[in-house]
Amino acid sequence: MTYYNDGSVLIRDRIEADTAYFSEAERAQGWNDTEDKHSARMADHKAGICIALVAEYNGVPAGYVNLYFKVSDGPFVDKGLPVVVDFNVLEKFRRRGIGRRLMDMTEVLAAERSDEICLSVGLYDGYGAAQRIYVKRGYIPDGSGVWYGSQPAWAYDREYMIDDDLCLWMSKKLR
């Protein structure tokens, strides 16, 4: 299904070929990525657990995002909110409005189910661009502090690795 097309950016459903493409492209830019992650997103999309979107730029896959219909962990777990998971634009396609369009469409789709959307964002410098984007889009921290995986991080505990699991939960009102 096509959700958006302005001639240069097209947003569509994820397809099987995207799994190997994005995994290879992300490894080529130095990211620690596996096909398993992308295969799992595709399987969840097929199962109706999420909507997995891909943005093409002039016909080339450039980015993706997944909108899960219900958050499975973190401070919003009991609120039944849709959650943004694994939003990414390949580095060579950034600063062209692709991410903005992907997030616009994600929020439109989320608004069909809820008046609020949530997400978590990593805390190390690799997530700096995402942190800025989310704040500019109106996402605000929920106030529960930093989380590590599915648990709140405890103050003064030195046991946490600064990796993808160390995150801050945020939400945004859609209406």
Image: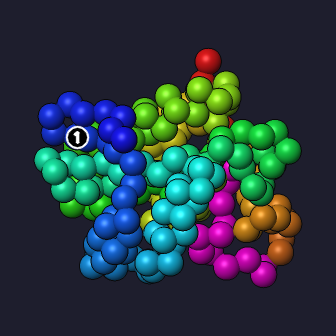
In this rendering, position of residue 157 left or right of residue 41: right
Number of callouts in the render? Answer: 1
Identify the residue shown where x is 43% and y is 34%.
Answer: 105
x and y percentages locating residue 31 in the rendered image: 39, 76
Is the image coloured rainbow, by chain, by secondary structure, or in one colour? rainbow
x and y percentages locating residue 39 in the rendered image: 48, 71
Q: Which residue lies furthest to the top in this view?
A: 175
Quarter of the C terminus within the rendering: top right
In this rendering, position of residue 121 left or right of residue 19: right
Query: Circle 1 is placed at which residue position?
Result: 9
Identify the residue shown where x is 75% and y is 55%.
Answer: 72
Image quarter of residue 156: bottom right
Query: Could you say which is closer to the camera, residue 38 or residue 74?
Result: 38
What type is the residue that disc 1 sits on? Val
Residue 23 among those drawn in magenta: no
Question: Main SS of the magenta segment?
Answer: loop
Does residue 9 lie above or below 28 as drawn?
above
Q: Give the range drawn in magenta.
A: 158-170
Identify the residue shown where x is 14% and y is 47%.
Answer: 58
Q: Is residue 21 visible?
A: yes
Quarter of the N terminus within the rendering: top left
Image quarter of residue 76: top right
> In what element is the residue under mark 1?
strand
Identify the residue shown where x is 37% and y is 65%.
Answer: 16
Q: Is residue 64 visible?
A: no
x and y percentages locating residue 20 in the rendered image: 34, 74
Query: Could you say which is closer to the camera, residue 12 or residue 47?
Result: 47
Query: Could you say which is closer to the camera, residue 80 or residue 98?
Result: 80
Does residue 117 lie above or below 164 as drawn?
above
Does residue 113 lie above or below 54 as drawn?
above
In this rendering, position of residue 7 left or right of residue 2: left
x and y percentages locating residue 121 in the rendered image: 58, 55
